[in-house]
Image (cartoon, helix red, strand yellow):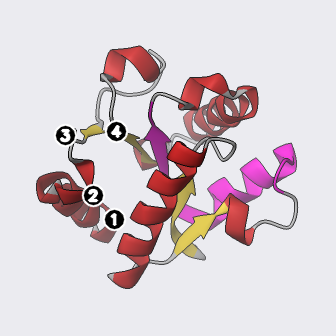
Amino acid sequence: MDYGFWMMCNGKSPISYDRATYILKLLEDRGHRGYFTQRDSKDKDSLTEISEAVDKCQYILIVFDEDFKKDNFSMTTLEKVFKKLIYTRRLHRIIPLVIGIKRDKVVPSYVPNFCLEFCDNWKSDDRQFTRLENTLRS
């Protein structure tokens, strides 16, 4: 695969975007190769892009925060990713990152139980970042 992970977020939300780019930079600084639609895609609002991104990334990291469900394109993207991974039996590749909100408020019920739930002071949540890195290296 071309990339270790695809970082998904509500790209229209400054809060979600900032969280995603922080995590993206942190992981890339530690040697992981990330794909970020807002940075790497030629066509940022294309549904074709979704399938291609899933195919070229080992994991799909999704920033679930208070703004994720506010964007229809983010929700549509999530549904398409989920369906493709179910169809190809690769659902284990989704890694939900829950930040600043309770999981049940933002993560759709069809997303698997495994989530990395960050504490309120999420940037210093070394435990979850370590778990994330260990998963990406596996």
> Dot 2 lies on which element?
helix
Of 51 and 23, which appears nearest the observer?
23
Give me the disc on residue 80.
Answer: none
Q: Which residues are magenta?
A: 44-65
Q: Amino acid at mark 4?
A: Ile
Of 122 and 82, which appears nearest the observer?
122
Horizontal and vertical percent for residue 23? Answer: 40, 62
Q: Which residue is mark 4?
A: 99
Mark 4 or 1: the one toward you: 4
Horizontal and vertical percent for residue 94? Answer: 45, 44
Mark positioned earlier in the residue sequence (1 or 3): 3
Q: Which residue is mark 1?
A: 136
Horizontal and vertical percent for residue 63? Answer: 46, 43
Mark positioned earlier in the residue sequence (3 or 4): 4
Compared with residue 68, is residue 62 higher up or lower down, i.e. above or below?
below
Q: Are marks 1 and 2 in contact (CB under 8 Å)?
A: yes
Mark 2 or 3: the one toward you: 3
Quarter of the image holding residue 52? bottom right
**Mark 1 surroundings within 10 Å by alpha-carbon count, few (fewer than 14), some (14 through 19), many (20 or more):** some
**Disc 4 to disc 2, how far (Cα)?**
14 Å
Mark positioned earlier in the residue sequence (4 or 2): 4
Q: Residue at x 44, y 73 (%)?
A: 25
Q: Which residue is mark 3?
A: 119
